[in-house]
Image (cartoon, helix red, strand yellow):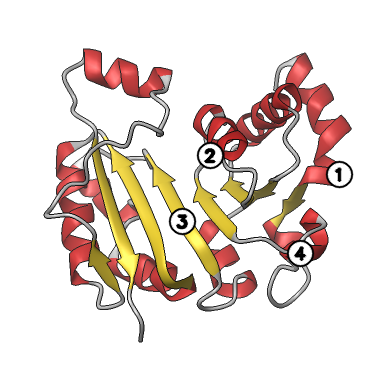
Amino acid sequence: MTVGQERAWHRRWPELGRQVGDLPEGPLDTAAWFGRDAPVLLEIGSGMGETTSRLAAAAPELNYLAVEVYQPGLAQLLLRAEALGLTNLRLLRGDAVDLLTDHIAPGTLAGMRIFFPDPWPKKRHHKRRLVQPAFIALAASRLAPGAVIHLATDWADYADQMLEVLSAEPLLRNQHDGWAPRPEWRPVTKFESRANEEGRVSRDLMFERVAD
């Protein structure tokens, strides 16, 4: 971590962050942690926090949860949250599968976002990709009916895989005919700009949780 990130970590993490592995058993008490009862949106893989901070700032009515494994990224997000004066953002460090399995009750999330997950571009590494049938079944089960899971990627074959996996999940329904139009409210990050310069087209997918 940079000096600034390390200072932000020591200054704000005790209030705004938790380790997934240290959470008490059972569902996360978001109302107590945020100090209010509000719809909870989960972002998986917040990276360096550029998108996360801006989207949390744009939706003060949401309790915005971000889960990420990369400590410098979380520290950078703390810096961004401070700069924007955010009060509706909380951070979790650890495995999203463990979080969803052990600490998010079924049918409770108001939304989920997975923007530009690691594409693992080599074919022999595709099995490491996050978006697989078992994971999407778990994710869908944690969404409330009508809640949307929104994914984006700039890797064409991963986009195709995402579309196939989400389309096969019985708890989800595509809100569009194939790809979703790129929403104007999703920030264009430096990462996505670089992908565009290199000729990789970003694709969005929005699937809605249907009733059981």
Residue 159: give x, y in percent of width and height.
20, 45
The amino acid at mark 1 is: Pro
Binning the other alpha carbons within 10 Å of mark 1 as few (below 14), some (14 to 19) or many (20 upward) gives few
**Mark closer to the chain start, 1 or 3:** 1
**Mark closer to the chain start, 2 or 1:** 1
**Mark closer to the chain start, 3 or 2:** 2
Residue 24: give x, y in percent of width and height.
78, 71
**Compared with residue 173, is residue 197 higher up or lower down, i.e. above or below?**
above
Front in this rendered view, residue 120 or 199: 199
Binning the other alpha carbons within 10 Å of mark 3 as few (below 14), some (14 to 19) or many (20 upward) gives many
**Alpha carbon distance from label 4 to label 1:** 17 Å
Q: Which residue is mark 1?
A: 14
Please report contact status of discs 2 and 1: CB closer than 8 Å, yes or no. no
Residue 93: give x, y in percent of width and height.
66, 48
Q: Which element type, helix, strand or loop, lies under badge 3?
A: strand
**Compared with residue 169, is residue 128 higher up or lower down, i.e. above or below?**
above
Q: Which residue is mark 3?
A: 112
Binning the other alpha carbons within 10 Å of mark 4 as few (below 14), some (14 to 19) or many (20 upward) gives few
Q: Which residue is mark 2?
A: 46
**Mark closer to the chain start, 4 or 3:** 4
The amino acid at mark 3 is: Met
Judge from the rendering whether residue 125 lies leftward or rightward of residue 34; answer left or right. left
The amino acid at mark 2 is: Ser
Q: Which element type, helix, strand or loop, lies under badge 2?
A: loop
